[in-house]
Image (spheres, helix red, strand yellow):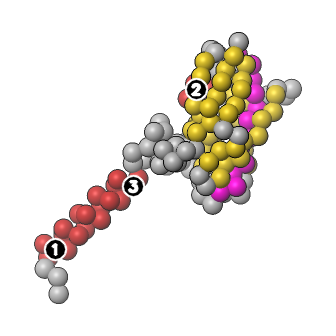
Amino acid sequence: MPRPRHVIAVFAAVMALASAACGGSSGDHAGDDHATLESVNEPVDGAEEVTITAADIDYRPERLELKAGEPTNVTVVNEGESLHDFTLKEADVHMNVDPGDEATTSVVVDSAGQFKAICSVPGHADAGMVVQVSVTQ
């Protein structure tokens, strides 16, 4: 029979590993409940349409071109087996997409530049779920 301090040591080690696995993402929402955090805009009639496919663990296409100040409707189709999101901080967008589902948001970035849209589910951006966003005037 294990001694009580061995049980405590094993429990502490398991908790430390679980804690490390749930944190440490490059996303803004690391450790948050992604099912409840969203900042989604209604699609804009007549705006350019773009579809991004999320899979385990990448986005296709890996590049997105936008015009500064102009709305683009972005549809994300989740072909993966886990929750993914589309987070573009410069447009104040965070949209969750359940496995097998799709969602659409309008995106407007006001200034030109190079940005990154990520899947902020812990560990996903670090594993490569990043879209390079080029915004031109």
Image depth: mark 2 or mark 1 in front: 2
Q: Earlier in the sequence, mark 3 or mark 1?
A: 1
Measure how far apart labels 2 and 1 are at the Cα level. 49 Å
User: Does any portion of residue 55 appear in the rendered image?
Assistant: yes
Q: Quadrant of residue 82?
A: bottom right
Q: Residue at x 14, y 76 (%)?
A: 4
Furthest residue in direction bottom, as rendered: 1
| For residue 35, side relative to residue 136 (left or right) | left
Q: Are marks 2 and 3 in contact (CB under 8 Å)?
A: no
Question: In the drawing, what numbered circle is on residue 21?
Answer: 3
Tag 2 secondary structure:
strand
Question: In the drawing, what numbered circle is on residue 28?
Answer: none
| For residue 75, side relative to residue 119 (left or right) | right
Q: Is residue 25 magenta?
A: no
Image depth: mark 2 or mark 3 in front: 2
Q: Quadrant of the C terminus?
A: top right
Residue 87 is situated, as x and y percent measured from the top left of the image, at 58, 36
Instruction: Say which amino acid is labelled 3.
Output: Ala
Measure how far apart labels 3 and 1 are at the Cα level. 23 Å
| For residue 13, side relative to residue 128 (left or right) | left
Residue 88 is situated, as x and y percent measured from the top left of the image, at 59, 32
Tell me the crowding category of disc 1: few under 14, some 14 to 19, or many 20 or more residues within 10 angstroms, Cα based. few
Tag 3 secondary structure:
helix
Tell me the crowding category of disc 3: few under 14, some 14 to 19, or many 20 or more residues within 10 angstroms, Cα based. few
Q: Earlier in the sequence, mark 2 or mark 3?
A: 3
Q: Are marks 2 and 1 in contact (CB under 8 Å)?
A: no
Furthest residue in direction top, as rendered: 137
Give the labeled residue for mark 2. 115
Give the labeled residue for mark 1. 6
Q: Residue at x 17, y 87 (%)?
A: 1
Q: Earlier in the sequence, mark 2 or mark 1?
A: 1
Give the residues in magenta. 68-80
